[in-house]
Image: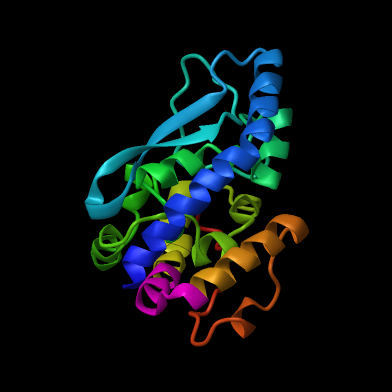
Amino acid sequence: MYPFLKRGCDIVFSLLGIILCAPILLIFIFLLLLSGESTPIYSSYRVGFGGELFKMYKLRTMKRVVGSSTKPLTAYNDSRISFLGRLLRFSKIDELPQFFNILNGDLSFVGPRPMLPEVFMYYSEETREQLKGIRPGVTGIGSIVFRNEGNLFKNIKGSYEVFYKQEIAPIKGELERWYISKRSFKVDFKILVLTLVAVVYGQVKSIHTYFKNLPSVEIQVKDSY
């Protein structure tokens, strides 16, 4: 019953979100066009339900650098992020086009955050199999805990990819597996509320007080990265 009711809520509230947020979306599309960006809507392939790839939509926040390869992870103070892009990312306004992904069934409001295929492979086989069995979400427990993920790269002098794979992916994987085993309307509602708190205040303190048996979150930064 839960999956069907959740999908029904996704359809209703995504339609409502599209209607209510259309003016905001149009304003920022116009601002991006004024800034010289010819394609204000950015799309990239992400791993979705069943392991199928889908195109996820966002407002463009990064400058396109001709001749450079695309990096799968966003660094601390990444130079590719534009001035307007930083505002869009901090406020999460860049995520508004994902209402259309929700309506289409690619995403749910709450679920594990969909990953680029190359980042998806950083996770263990067990975690990947579990993630394939659930529709990804615009927000989730991993998104809240790692609200400022880019800051973790601040003191990394070596490979961000190695650091992510060895330190972040195992913890994120535990968090997402916890959600998959505990998901319910009550858990989803808490995640939605805490997402708003994280957007307004930048982070959620003492998140373990809101969820029982939530995996420990401790990142170790080593000199070897």
Q: Is residue 130 left or right of residue 32?
A: left
Task: Indicate the position of residue 7 as horizontal and vertical percent values.
Answer: 37, 58
Residue 18 percent location from the top left of the image: 55, 40
Q: Nearer the viewer, residue 2 or 76?
A: 2
Quick check: can you spot residue 120?
yes
Image quarter of the N terminus: bottom left
Position of residue 221 in the picture relative to residue 8 (left or right)? right
Whole-percent x, y for residue 70 in the image: 45, 29
Front residue of 221 and 150: 150
Q: Residue furthest right?
A: 201
Q: How many marks?
A: 0
Say left or right for 23 vs 129: right
Residue beneath the point at 49% across and 28% down? 42
12 in the magenta segment:
no
Asked whether 44 or 158 is in front, the reply is 44
Instruction: Name the residue at 68% across, 28% down.
Output: 28
Task: Look at 28% across and 41% down and name the residue there.
Answer: 53
Please tell me which residue lies in front, 124 or 112.
Answer: 112
Residue 128 occupies quadrant: bottom left
**Residue at 63%, 76% in the rendered image:** 207
Kindly indicate the quadrant of the structure image that contains residue 134.
bottom left
Q: Which residues are magenta?
A: 175-186
Image position of 133 with respect to 18: above or below: below
On screen, residue 19 versus residue 14, left or right, reads: right
Q: Position of residue 183 (x, y in %)?
A: 41, 74
